[in-house]
Image (cartoon, rainbow, N blue to C red):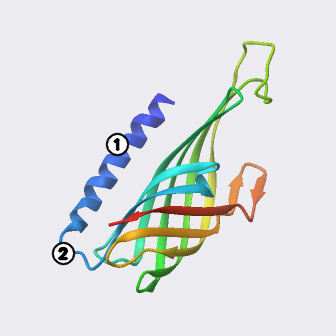
Amino acid sequence: MKKFLTVAIFFLSNFLSISSFSQVDTEGSNHGIYLEFFGNGIFYSVNYDTRFSKKSDGLGGKVGFGYIAVAGDHYSSFPFLVNYLLGKEGHYFEIGAGANYLVADYKNGTGVSESPEIAKWEGWSASLSLGYRYQPVAGGFLFRAGITPMFKEREFRPFWPQASVGYAF
């Protein structure tokens, strides 16, 4: 887990430093910070999204982090995704593909345990993103909604929902 966090922090810092160059003379809001419910962060995640150009649409990506504790169980998610925005004047169709690194610490899978033994699971899942995004060209309130088909080992969830609210700049 420590190795993964070190690599994730390295890539995140490079991702943010590369995207910061696009803040000069932008043609619109091409950055966003938002809280995503469900989606590829599973329960919820806080995400940073950017376009790889100075435009409000086109190719971009997101990175995020999610954490939840329920009845003694702890779940962490580290989603990242490459996406494409197609549309104009703040209304976009979003399509994307990415992965999520998941970490679960749970007590015998139930959250209630007589034993102090804690089980741990770590692994990857793949996901797609299909939906609508409202991100005003001048910046401000950001909204996303759609579905996030998820793939993990022998498991497939074709209609996992996603909804996000945040701020575009």
User: Of callouts 2 and 1, which one flags the residue occurring earlier in the amino acid sequence?
Assistant: 1
Tag 2: Cα neighbours inside 10 Å, few (<14), some, or many (≥20)? Answer: few
Measured along the vertical axis of the image, is residue 114 above or below residue 110? above
Horizontal side of 27 relative to 143 (left or right) equals left
State which quarter of the image contains the C terminus: bottom left
For badge 2, the amino acid type reads Asp
Residue 124 in percent (x, y) is at: 62, 46
Residue 71 in percent (x, y) is at: 72, 29
Considering the numbered disc 1 on the image, is that residue within a helix, a strand or a loop? Answer: helix
Considering the numbered disc 2 on the image, is that residue within a helix, a strand or a loop? Answer: loop
Residue pointed to by mark 2: 25
The quadrant holding residue 75 is top right
Query: Which residue occupies the foreground of this view, 128 or 134?
Result: 134
Measured along the vertical axis of the image, is residue 56 above or below residue 34? below
Q: How many marks?
A: 2
For badge 1, the amino acid type reads Phe
Q: Residue at x 30, y 77 (%)?
A: 28
Q: Residue at x 54, y 69 (%)?
A: 144
* Labelled pair 2, 1 in contact (Cβ < 8 Å): no
Measured along the vertical axis of the image, is residue 1 above or below residue 81? above
Q: Residue at x 46, y 58 (%)?
A: 34
- Checking the image for residue 128, the label placed there is none
Query: Which residue occupies the foreground of this view, 100 or 89?
Result: 89
Q: Residue at x 62, y 59 (%)?
A: 127
Q: CA distance from mark 2 to mark 1?
A: 27 Å
Tag 1: Cα neighbours inside 10 Å, few (<14), some, or many (≥20)? Answer: few
Residue pointed to by mark 1: 10
